[in-house]
Image (tube, coloured by chain):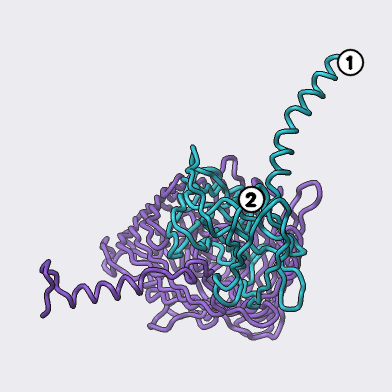
Amino acid sequence: MVRNARGVCVTHAVFLFFCCHLIAPTAQAQYDVEEESRVWLRAMLDVRVVRGGNDPSWTDGGPGKTRYGGDTSSERVTRLTLSQLAIEVGATLPWNVRAQAQLNLQRDLSDNDEPWLVEALLRKEWGKDENGLGLQLGLMSVPFSLEHVGPAWSPEYTISASALDSWMWEEISLAGAEGEWWHVTPGGLRLGILVGAGFGPDQLGRVVAVRGWAMGDGLSGLNADLLLPTGVRTEIFDERDDRVAAYTWLSIGDAGERVSVRVGLFDNFGDQEVAGVWHTRFATAGVTIHPHPSVDLIVQYLSGEARVSSPANDSSLRAYYALLSHHRGRHRFSVRYDSFRVNDLDGGTVLTEEQGDGVTAAYFLQMGLRHRFGLEYIWLDSRRPTGVVPEPSQDGWQLSYRFRY
Amino acid sequence: MHRLKRLLSMAFVLGVLPSATALAAEPGISGRVVGPDGKGIAEAVVFVQSPVDSASAPTRPRAAMDQVNKTFVPGLLPIVVGTEVRFPNHDQIHHHVYSFSRTKTFELPLYKGQDARPVLFDKLGAVTIGCNIHDWMSGVILVLPTGHYAVTDENGRFTLAGLPAGAYTVAAWHARRRGKLEETAQQVQLAATTPEITFTLALEPARNRPAIHGSRRTP
């Protein structure tokens, strides 16, 4: 060890010097702009402490309506769980085409450790935010949820989405094409027309008819399958009749997006002559209002029907919610009222009737770019007078830590 | 009435003349920034590297980089070192502004309107600004040693006005330039006339991340 007159370890000083030299930006580096990589990778990890109601969740084959419920002996339990690991990859391709894909690992929803491919698509745009065209090809869900606008398509305002929007991402996954035109008029109106078509959602409606509505934040995809109360799993992406499903999403609002109204129509044009194919169609309308920059008010309504020949489970579907969220600095408070209904249309042996209401309150604390803590309480009352599922009425809370890379 | 107009005219002339005289006495430097093919380069910044202003400003300089339609406005903001920059968000959606640049690392968690605190830029260099929600949003704040700078127009033209006579080192910067900044530096002797200088820069091709607009964008 060599020391100088002041007793400072020379090797230490040399080491520090090199460190400083490496760390201190040169004049050149100072004025450089970091180049954007043509390929990018993002991830989101969501770990939770959850305590649901007494009934086991539907994800465990029980009647519970939330993602996490009690144990098999119908006792409340507190669990530590990995709710979601989302991996997003993207790339800039020639001609300014954007490629992106997302994989989600949600072990409680899948029956194994296989991640689900939530989306994989190519997107090309012409124009700017004021006026443009977009074309998208690949695997995707529909853009109808007004809540799933957070990172990796997570709900932005609460941990669990409304029953309506939970269903959108639970059961709709298709592979196809989508075109969109958007325009801001000289008078300041923002207009949008989106039309899409694709294959895959031939069993759409089965989950919501047989199981009923549920509230959660799970995302399905190409290889997703969900558990039904009957104990079987239903594939979410399952093309059987070779018919194209079609949808449209129309939007109008002011240029500053203080108020926007959106209307969506979906029809899978399912051929009921083909075994296992459901014919499901619905309309949804939503309003987003920002009366103040820190306040979000969202109301969304859905009405539709799902029909299947054998076994008959024809059902009409109806749901709506109203959400109020206030954001200030790192804090967000949200409260939402949910209403959801299933009416049995065929009077067959399996009745799908359901009436339910729910209230959700959530608080988020954002810590820097990467960390978010969330606390949510759900109270819901679901009534299924007859059928395979009794009357699950429960409440529960979740404490979430989310890391975003 | 006529007397009032005459008084106002005189006041206007008296008010304007001194500054016009000052401008005439400080001709400045003008010129172009061009590519190897001779075509003008827009959005380049030409600035005085030295001498550095010795007199400190009585108040801290301020500037703003707005957010409008999911875009930073302006996308390129040159400032003098020591400037406080505000980041108002005039969209009705949240933005989460951040920078991981070595010159300045900061973040402004999700906000709308005028809620975000101003950020002090106290080191020289380029700072890349992004939004954690909208990954295609990108802006650059260029922190310069002096307040004498100009951004080139679409023809690559610039004017550094208000410079007193003297010797200056002038450099040209562009976000996609190849080579070292020092290689662009030119010594300029400013006397009574306005010298014309030309900078030739080679640029890397644009590598902006494709944006998502319409219904698929994240609000």
Query: Which one is nearer the viewer's eye here, B179 or B42?
Result: B179
Q: Which residue is mark 1?
A: B2
Q: Percent position (x, y) of residue B78?
A: 58, 56
Q: Which chain is purple?
A: A
> Up-down: is A241 above or below A212?
below
Q: Percent position (x, y) of residue A276?
A: 60, 82
Q: Percent position (x, y) of residue B140?
A: 56, 61
Q: Quarter of the image for the N terminus of chain B: give it.
A: top right
Spatial CA span between label 2 and label 1: 42 Å
Query: Which one is nearer the viewer's eye here, B165 or A288?
Result: B165
Query: Could you say which disc has been placed on residue A64 in the image?
Result: none
Q: Residues within 10 Å of mark 1 (few under 14, many from 20)?
A: few
Q: Which chain is cyan?
A: B
Q: Residue at x 50, y 75 (%)?
A: A88
Looking at the image, residue A354 sits to the left or right of residue B198; the answer is left
Q: Which residue is mark 2?
A: B165
- Same subunit, tags 2 and 1: yes
